[in-house]
């Protein structure tokens, strides 16, 4: 019997599907009514006697053959009123780009490797394990004498991204501005960037022009070229942008001497950070290196943080060491004397007028830093609200006891403080059940809601697992387990649904080790 299903079925499309599959395979193996095998083993034991011919241009998800990946065939995710007329122009634009860079590849690769296409195919060994040993082995097998390692790797990466831009899901869904199709265009953008570095040709304008023929279903974009310019190009990365990002990140990192940023490593020749209350300043000379192409550049930078999201930074590729030393002395002196205006003026003198701010950071890291800044502000806000809660609780209690309406401002304040207390319960090392019972009783008393039930459920699930691991190391501590069991009715009261996946599996292991089955008396009271 053959069983073939999509791997994403297990755990991705169907929650706990991987657990069901594991149980099924274990049951079949123990039952011994069937032997588990795979196609490779079966063919080795039973060589094929017949030959099957595959129907060309066919697929499992498109009744029109493979039109879903190159035409508006009607196969889509079901968004009413939308079409996929963008598929054909996008495909043709990528085909044009592929053919254009193939010429560059053959011309430039033949100057640095023995057999360009063989080297391209065997580059997979580096992709699968990007280590110094694998790179040296690849160079030994393919590189011509005195060829630049960086140039060879750039050429190979250009071809790798030219293949990645045909990733299947880029055409599978409904809209050219969808995340899957944007990712395909990001691969294409990297191909264009590398082609420019390798062959000194600019393919950007023609590629964008071809994308104008790809209509978008979203009125904001209208056509593919606008998606490319507004979403894809801003995400393009180079060493200078990584250097800018590092400079800003150094303000907030505790140990910024050596950071890894995506596929880039950083190391400092010099670094100094000064703080004066909320204001911070960092100066440095750092080297940024691509771990993929081994390209590297050295930057001098200066960044000043004025509070909240106000950051001003400068970066230079060619500042002389003596000039940097002079700048450092003058800027540190001005900062320590509280002359922030002079600091900003010195940055313009030494770096020029061009500067960057937090908005030039990579999206994920920008969000991380903004979240960190907002958390600091939220902590100050919480402290203020908590002061009001503690001071005015007797007054609000008196209003409630006398059936006098409670002002909305007070209700909002109390609800915020109690929700913050509940979050802290699950973020602490140990669960304080008595404190949790107090918070839940207060929430129920004032008829408040849990602000973010998904977050609380997630944190509760993680906290329960940690508590259970702690209990497992204390074999005879029944009281701790009983205290933990008091939590579940409290969670049910607000219809919270923690993920017990890891906890239930772990508890089952404990029960098997001790030779008994989990029961209401010796385990969780969880259905």
Image (cartoon, helix red, strand yellow):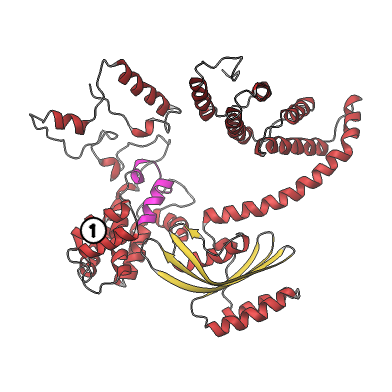
Q: Secondary structure at mark 1?
A: helix
Q: Position of residue 112 (x, y in %)?
A: 23, 70
Name the magenta segment's main secondary structure: helix
Left/right of residue 497 with respect to residue 422 in the rendered view: left
- Closer to the camera, 271 or 494? 271
The part of the image, by quadrant, that contains residue 327 is: bottom right
511 is higher (above) or lower (below) than 416: above
- Closer to the camera, 328 or 473? 473
465 is higher (above) or lower (below) than 358: above
Q: Position of residue 411 (x, y in %)?
A: 80, 35
- Image quadrant for the C terminus? top right
Q: Residue at x 43, y 47 (%)?
A: 179
Q: Residue at x 73, y 48 (%)?
A: 379
Q: Is-magenta flag for residue 135?
A: no
Left/right of residue 74 with respect to residue 253 in the rendered view: left
The part of the image, by quadrant, that contains residue 66 is: top left
Q: How many marks?
A: 1
Q: Position of residue 456 (x, y in %)?
A: 63, 34
- Image quadrant for the N terminus? top left
Characterize the local packing of mark 1: few (<14), some (14-19) or many (20 or more) Cα atoms within 10 angstroms. some
* Residue 423 visible in the displayed image: yes
Q: Position of residue 356 (x, y in %)?
A: 57, 68
- Closer to the camera, 424 or 383? 424
The residue stretch that appears in magenta: 169-187
* Residue 93 visible in the displayed image: no
Identify residue for label 1. Answer: 120
Q: Residue at x 33, y 32 (%)?
A: 6
- Closer to the camera, 265 or 202? 265
């Amino acid at each position: 019997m053959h069983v073939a299903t999509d791997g994403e079925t297990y755990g991705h499309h169907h929650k706990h599907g991987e657990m069901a599959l594991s149980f099924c395979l274990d049951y079949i193996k123990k039952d011994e009514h069937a032997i588990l095998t795979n196609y490779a083993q079966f063919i080795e034991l039973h060589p094929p006697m017949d030959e099957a011919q595959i129907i060309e241009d066919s697929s499992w998800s498109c009744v029109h053959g493979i039109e879903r990946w190159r035409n508006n065939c009607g196969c889509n995710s079901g968004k009413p009123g939308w079409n996929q007329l963008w598929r054909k122009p996008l495909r043709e634009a990528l085909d044009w780009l592929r053919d254009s860079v193939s010429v560059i590849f053959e011309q430039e690769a033949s100057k640095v490797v023995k057999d360009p296409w063989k080297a391209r195919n065997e580059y997979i060994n580096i992709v699968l394990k990007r280590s110094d040993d694998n790179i040296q082995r690849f160079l030994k097998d393919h590189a011509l004498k005195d060829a630049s390692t960086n140039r060879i790797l750039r050429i190979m990466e250009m071809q790798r991204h030219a293949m990645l831009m045909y990733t299947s899901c880029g055409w599978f869904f409904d809209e050219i501005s969808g995340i899957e199709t944007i990712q395909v265009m990001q691969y294409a953008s990297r191909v264009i960037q590398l082609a420019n570095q390798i062959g000194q040709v600019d393919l950007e304008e023609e590629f964008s022009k071809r994308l104008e023929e790809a209509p978008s279903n979203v009125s904001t974009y209208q056509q593919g070229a606008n998606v490319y310019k507004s979403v894809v190009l801003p995400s393009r990365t180079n060493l200078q942008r990584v250097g800018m990002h590092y400079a800003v990140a150094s303000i907030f990192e505790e140990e910024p001497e050596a950071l890894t940023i995506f596929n880039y490593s950083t190391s400092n020749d010099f670094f100094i950070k000064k703080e004066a209350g909320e204001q911070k300043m960092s100066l440095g000379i750092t080297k940024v290196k691509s771990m993929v192409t081994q390209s590297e550049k050295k930057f001098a930078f200066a960044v000043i943080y004025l509070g909240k999201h106000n950051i001003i930074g400068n970066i230079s590729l060619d500042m002389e060491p003596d000039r940097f030393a002079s700048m450092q002395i003058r800027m540190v002196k001005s900062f320590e004397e509280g002359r922030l205006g002079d600091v900003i003026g010195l940055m313009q003198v030494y770096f020029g007028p061009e500067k960057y701010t937090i908005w030039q950071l990579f999206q994920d890291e920008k969000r991380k830093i903004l979240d960190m800044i907002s958390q600091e502000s939220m902590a100050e806000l919480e402290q203020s609200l908590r002061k009001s809660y503690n001071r005015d609780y007797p007054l609000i209690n008196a209003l409630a006891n006398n059936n006098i309406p409670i002002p909305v401002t007070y209700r909002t304040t109390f609800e915020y403080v109690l929700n913050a207390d509940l979050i802290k319960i699950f973020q602490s090392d140990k669960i304080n059940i008595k404190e949790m019972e107090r918070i839940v009783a207060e929430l129920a008393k004032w008829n408040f809601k849990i602000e973010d039930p998904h977050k609380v459920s997630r944190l509760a699930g993680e906290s329960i697992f940690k508590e259970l691991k702690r209990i497992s190391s204390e074999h005879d501590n029944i009281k701790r387990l009983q205290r933990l069991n008091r939590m579940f009715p409290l969670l049910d009261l607000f219809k919270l649904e923690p993920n017990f996946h890891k906890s239930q599996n772990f508890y089952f292991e404990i029960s098997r080790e001790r030779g008994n089955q989990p029961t209401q008396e010796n385990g969780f009271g969880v259905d």
